Amino acid sequence: MRWARRAVPAVTAAVAALAARDLMQRDHALLRNFPVLGRARYLLEAIGPELRQYIVAGNNEERPFTRDQRRWVYASAKQENNYFGFGTDNDIEYTPGYPIIKHRTFGRAVPSSTPTAGHDVRLPCAKVLGGARGRARAFRPESVVNISGMSFGSLSGNAVTALNRGAALAGCLQNTGEGGLSPYHRNGGELVFQLGTAYFGCRDEQGRFSLDRLRDLVASAPVKALEIKLSQGAKPSLGGLLPGAKVSAEIAATRGIPAGQDCVSPSRHAEFSDCDSLLDWVELLAAETGLPVGIKSAVGDLGFWQELATLMRDTGRGVDFVTIDGGEGGTGAAPLIFTDSVSLPFQQGFSRVYKVFAEHDLHEQVVFAGGGKLGLPDNAIVAFALGCDLVNVGREAMLSIGCVQAQKCHTDTCPTGVATQNAWLARGLDPTLKSVRAANYLRTLRRDLVKVAEACGVEHPGLIGTDAVEILDGRTGSTPLHEVYGYRPDWGLPSPADQAEIVRLMAPEAPQGGSATPSPTAVG
């Protein structure tokens, strides 16, 4: 045991040196008073989220995603049993604001009883994106569930690759995020290209927007639509800074910026300064590319939306889609005050914006998308009832490719290689395997949306009306969704023509009926 005898003095010397350092330093009183032992506190703090997730917290206590929610995503992604037994863990009767979806005893759509029903169902959007405004490259999105904007630079190249391949397998769209269109976005998945305030990927050497570079970019990749990002739920009205140390050659090439220099995203766009000039720019982009053009925003002051809708109604210019991001936050790193308290949560923000467009008789001409924990079926159903035509999934998609909610997205130390540029950590994420898991999750979410729609008596989640959802006030009362948010009875649904067309499209996809055949004495 010579090695042990030699190790003891070495370990003793190391501990003594550490104790001496703790006693001499002045930054932490705890360590000056309790050298070495005090470090246990910082260790526990560092692994606190993991301890709470797996040891301390109950199934529905952890945030932003509970253990049950994460388990559902993980099991769906791995095609494991994602059912739950012995009833709900949720305290339904004593939770004000809890949504209840009302099934129909008899409805137009009859759920199939086969075990695999809905697993591979095609679930296109109920509206044609760009159709109302006659865009040259208008199209009907093949999936009502799509991947939200998450930039390369925020996510690793392997993570972006996995999501893009997953989008291709699932037949859905991937939003590039404002960080530009990287090589990792070119793995078969169709894209929504996001234009942020720094115009990454389509800017000139002076950092100004370049229409020529945008045209070249769109021509070189499967870009289906353009999204102008005004703000996001994680940090509305804030710009951003990527330190020069993190601006690698790959990121620099993707964004069109110098490598190794601080990368600043301004808080406002330079190409427009009010609603009128915004609509001019929207029409310019649509005319030059032929693509549908929309905006993404968190919701604060409603004056902007009132002015935008009025100009759209009165001038004929307009956006093709509106993406509302909930103030619940998202994948972006932000100051705590912005994460917790700036901009409205999704349901309140979305319903207020939808009402503005409906009051201007524009709601049937615009495709509405939503983001903010809508990758969970219950939240997504409420979003569709409120008028969403598409839902975007961000953090849930990250969970599907391995995220463990370590909440280290802002530190570059993500242990699963999802939200980091550390090459060693990123190598642990296998894009080939994780892309399949992302696609499995997306398909499972679509399946659940279809099954709930059928339970409500309709063929498609976009046809679920506000009368199908009630919000609990507590143990003894509830309020219909349309009364909670002040909707008129016909709001929240596509136009009659769009409803008829999506029913026609869904008819081959939704086998009707149960497992038994009627008896000779059956009535009706």
Image (spheres, rainbow, N blue to C red):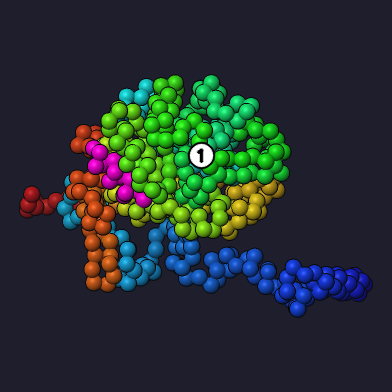
Classify 119 as above or below 484: above
Residue at 49% in and 42% down: 149
Q: Secondary structure at mark 1?
A: loop
Residue range of the region highlighted in magenta in the rendering: 349-361
Residue at 80% in and 69% down: 25
In the image: residue 325, left or right of residue 385: right
Residue at 52% in and 33% down: 270
User: Quick one: 436 or 322, which is closer to the camera?
Assistant: 322
**Label 1 sits on residue:** 268
In the image: residue 343, left or right of residue 520: right
Classify 282 as above or below 245: above
Picture coordinates of residue 117 (x, y %)? 32, 47
- Residue 105 colored in magenta in the image: no
User: Quick one: 220 or 206, which is closer to the camera?
Assistant: 206
Would you say residue 406 is visible in this rendering? yes
- Give the residue type that dot 1 points to: Arg
- Residue 354 colored in magenta in the image: yes
Picture coordinates of residue 344 (x, y %)? 40, 53
